[in-house]
Amino acid sequence: MGFIMQRIKIDLPQKFIFTTEISVRVYDVNFAGHLSNDSILSMVHEARILFLKNWGYSEVDTCGAGIIMFDAALQYKSQGYHGDILLFEVTVDNFIKNGCDFFFKITNKATGKEIARAKTGIAFFDYQSNKLVSVPEKFRFLIDSLKN
């Protein structure tokens, strides 16, 4: 009897609202010479910080609330290599009371080849009280206005 493993499949939203570029550095490649899986998650973190910074926010102050990541999913499509410039397209979707999902489409800028997809679940958090808080209305309004 064969073993069938379920695969992660990330369905991306139609519209992305932010784009940034991140270069694959020498310490982002593994022993096989291609982009390592842990580096992709670090780059997703960098892209999320740049996304927030673009509108004057940070991980500790997004419209008055902090954010905390509660899950992450990565779907690898092809290899990246040292020196590649990766294009990160970012959007936000799937709002719930206390959070939302950030989606990332990662492609090689030179070839257009898709490298990976990522989704990170983000909760809004009050670091002083150490408790979840509701999604700030101002943030949700910003995202909705950018998507329309």
Image (tube, rainbow, N blue to C red):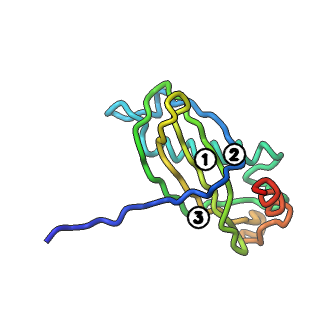
Q: Compared to 32, does 3 lie above or below?
A: below
Horizontal and vertical percent position of residue 16: 67, 50
In the structure shown, which secondary structural element does the residue marked by tag 2 occupy?
A: helix
What amino acid is at disc 2? Answer: Ile
Question: In the image, is 46 to the left or to the right of 129?
Answer: left
Q: Earlier in the sequence, mark 2 or mark 3?
A: 2
- Determine the residue located farthest toward the bottom in the rendered image: 97
Residue 100 lies in what quarter of the image?
Answer: bottom right
Q: Residues within 10 Å of mark 2 (few under 14, many from 20)?
A: some
> What residue type is disc 3 on?
Phe
Amino acid type, mark 1: His
Q: Position of residue 109 (x, y in %)?
A: 56, 31
Q: Which residue is mark 3?
A: 70
Q: What kind of element bears circle 3?
A: strand
> Is the C terminus in the top left, top right, bottom left or bottom right quadrant?
bottom right
The Cα atoms of the two marked residues, 1 and 3, are separated by: 13 Å
Q: Is residue 145 above or below residue 53?
A: below
What residue occupies the far left of the structure in this picture? 1
Residue found 83% across the figure and 62% down from its top: 141
Q: CA distance from mark 2 to mark 3?
A: 16 Å
Q: Nearer the viewer, residue 130 or 107?
A: 107
Mark number for residue 45? 1
Q: Choose top left, top right, bottom left or bottom right for residue 20.
A: top right
Q: Residue sitting at 66 percent across and 48 percent down?
A: 48
Labelled pair 2, 1 in contact (Cβ < 8 Å): yes
Rendering coords of residue 68 (x, y %): 66, 60
Task: Name the residue beneath numbered marker 2.
Answer: 49
> Crowding near pointer 1: few (<14 within 10 Å), some, many (20+)?
some
Q: What secondary structure is marked by label 1?
A: helix
Q: Nearer the viewer, residue 125 or 54?
A: 54
